[in-house]
Image (spheres, rainbow, N blue to C red):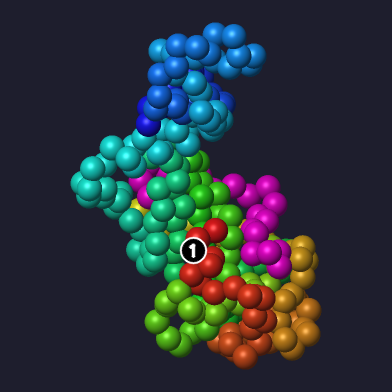
Amino acid sequence: MDYVIKLSDKIDDYEGYVEVLRLSDRFDGKTESLDKMVKIEKRLIQDLYKMTLSDLIRILSESSAGGENISTPILPQNCIKHVWVNRAAKQHEVYIEIPKRRWDITYHTQAFEKVGFPRMIFKYTVSDTQVTLSNIVAVQEQGILTDETPLFLFPFSNVNTDTKVCMGGNELPPIKTLSQLSTFHNIFFAAPFGDDYGSKTSNGKTIRELFTVLKDNDFNDEWLVPLKESTLGNFLKN
């Protein structure tokens, strides 16, 4: 089976669409009179696909690997998974475990010292030098991480129930290497917590009440609310 790729000689948008034609194996010199039938070397176009140029490059890169090892960049500390989304466009997904500990945080303008947070997993999306903290989930402190590890909602504000992160106007700085992500969780904790998305714990306490109770105390994992029908394996695939 042969394929023909149609693309412009002026490539300026990797998310623009290109056409991929799959040709019939047989030659047919009697197709000139058929309506809406295109021939290339007297062969019928059997299928027509459209995909972005970045996806095409990714597919071609993967198919040309020929069994060779594809190494990752130097990864940040506590990285549990790295995904090449698009090697040509330098797009990555990076998942980092944040151990259970106490953090100094600010709620609106009030400082709270040594507030207990649960064990968490941060998902970063990286495009060249630009970084976004896209998702945060919580996990219980005990046990090694596996595909079957149950996930829980991030218990405080600034993260929605769909695990998406909102940092307001706070942005992460550009990076030169993925290993710099080792410290980017500090930027998240340094950003003020507000009331967006509210608290998400089984004890029903407000954000202010939680920060007050957890000052100088470890987070109680029994307060974690399960993320419905979700495991770590599912989270790492999304």
For this orientation, the residue located farthest to the left is 68
Q: Which residues are magenta?
A: 160-178
> Quick one: label 1, few (<14), some, or many (20+) residues within 10 Å?
some
Tag 1 residue: 236
How far across and down, in percent of the image, does residue 96 sit?
44, 64
Residue 88 visible at all: no
**Label 1's element?**
helix
Residue 43 visible at all: yes
Q: Is residue 221 above or below residue 161?
A: below
How far across and down, in percent of the image, does residue 148 sit?
48, 78
Residue 196 appears left or right of 182: right
The residue under the point 39% across, 66% down is: 80
Screen quadrant of the C terminus: bottom right
Q: Is residue 42 above or below residue 179?
A: above
Residue 174 lies in the magenta stretch: yes
For this orientation, the residue located farthest to the top is 32
Instruction: Tell which of 8 and 106 is nearer to you.
Output: 8
How far across and down, in percent of the image, does residue 45 sit?
51, 23
The residue under the point 51% across, 28% down is: 46
Residue 143 appears left or right of 164: left
Q: Which amino acid type is shown beneath numbered disc 1? A: Leu
Instruction: Using the rendered view, name the quadrant where residue 128 is placed.
Output: top left
How far across and down, in percent of the image, does residue 61 sit?
34, 37
Residue 126 appears left or right of 220: left
Q: Is residue 95 above or below residue 168?
A: below
Residue 223 appears left or right of 10: right
Instruction: Tell which of 217 and 59 is nearer to you.
Output: 59
Instruction: Using the rendered view, name the quadrant where residue 190 is placed.
Output: bottom right
Instruction: Using the rendered view, name the quadrant where residue 42 is placed.
Output: top left
